[in-house]
Amino acid sequence: MRRTAAVIALLIVPALVLSGCTPSPPQSHSDPKPSSTPLFASEEEALKAATEAYAAYLKVSDSITADAGMRPERIEPLVSKSLLKDELTGFLIYSEKKLHTQGETAFFGSSLERYDADSVAVYACVDFSAQQLIDSAGLDVTPISRVNVQAFELSFVRASDSASLLLDGSEPWAGPGIC
C-alpha cells in the first residue's frame, strides 16, 4: 500500500496510518530509462546521496508540520512530481485539524537495497519518538499506540535537472534486519 503522503505516516498520527497498514514486500520497479551517465560510481556514493536527500526531506517536512502544515510547497524541491500531491494532501491535514508537531524525526541504520542509472532504494529506520503531535490548545495528542521506530523502504529518483535525488516513495518495511 503506497503511503498517503510520506508525511502522514512519518509525522501525523501514525496510529491511524500504520496500524491499518499491512506492510507488503517491496514491489518490483520497471526498468529505468537509459541515462547517458551513471548517477553514482559506487554503492557508497549512492547510499550517501540517498541519506543526504532523506535528511533534507525530513528537515523540511518537520518544519512544515511544526508550522501546522502552512506553506507546504516548501517540500516540492525534495520530492518527485508523482509524490508531491500526496505530500501536499498530508500537510493539509495538519492545518484542517489545527495540529502541529514539536520535535524532530530522525533516522538511522540506512542500508542500500539497490541503485541504477536513475534511481536508488534504501532501507532505513525512522524514529518518531522525539516528536509530539500538539493540538490547538497546546495539548500533546500523540497517540499512545504510535509506532516510535519503523523500518521503511525509501525510493529516490534522479532530479531531472541535476544529479541530486528526490524522494519518490516510502513504504513501511516488515522484513528482517533493518531496525
Image (tube, rainbow, N blue to C red):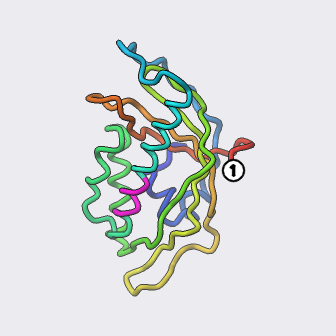
Look at the image and give the residue range highlighted in magenta.
58-63
| Residue 171 within the magenta-colored segment of the rendering | no
Question: What residue is shown at x 50% (from left), y 30% (from top)?
Answer: 45
Q: Nearer the viewer, residue 90 or 75?
A: 75
The residue at the far right in this view is 176
Where does residue 174 sit, x and y in percent of width and height?
69, 45
How many marks the image carries: the answer is 1
Helix, strand or loop: magenta stretch = helix
Residue that numbered label 1 is attached to: 179
Q: Is residue 142 above or below residue 92?
A: below
Q: Nearer the viewer, residue 39 or 26?
A: 39
Does residue 177 appear left or right of residue 135 in this picture? right
Question: What residue is shown at x 58% (from left), y 31% (from top)?
Answer: 27
Where does residue 154 sit, x and y in percent of width and height?
52, 41
Amino acid, disc 1: Cys
Specify the quadrant of the image occupied by residue 161.
Answer: top left
Question: What residue is shown at x 42% (from left), y 38% (from top)?
Answer: 168
Q: Nearer the viewer, residue 64 or 106?
A: 106
Q: Is residue 138 above or below residue 152?
A: below
Q: Callout 1 environment at 10 Å: few (<14), some (14 to 19), or many (20+)?
A: some
Quarter of the N terminus within the rendering: top right
Question: What residue is shown at x 42% (from left), y 23% (from top)?
Answer: 39
Q: Is residue 34 above or below residue 22?
A: above
Is disc 1 placed on a helix, strand or loop?
loop
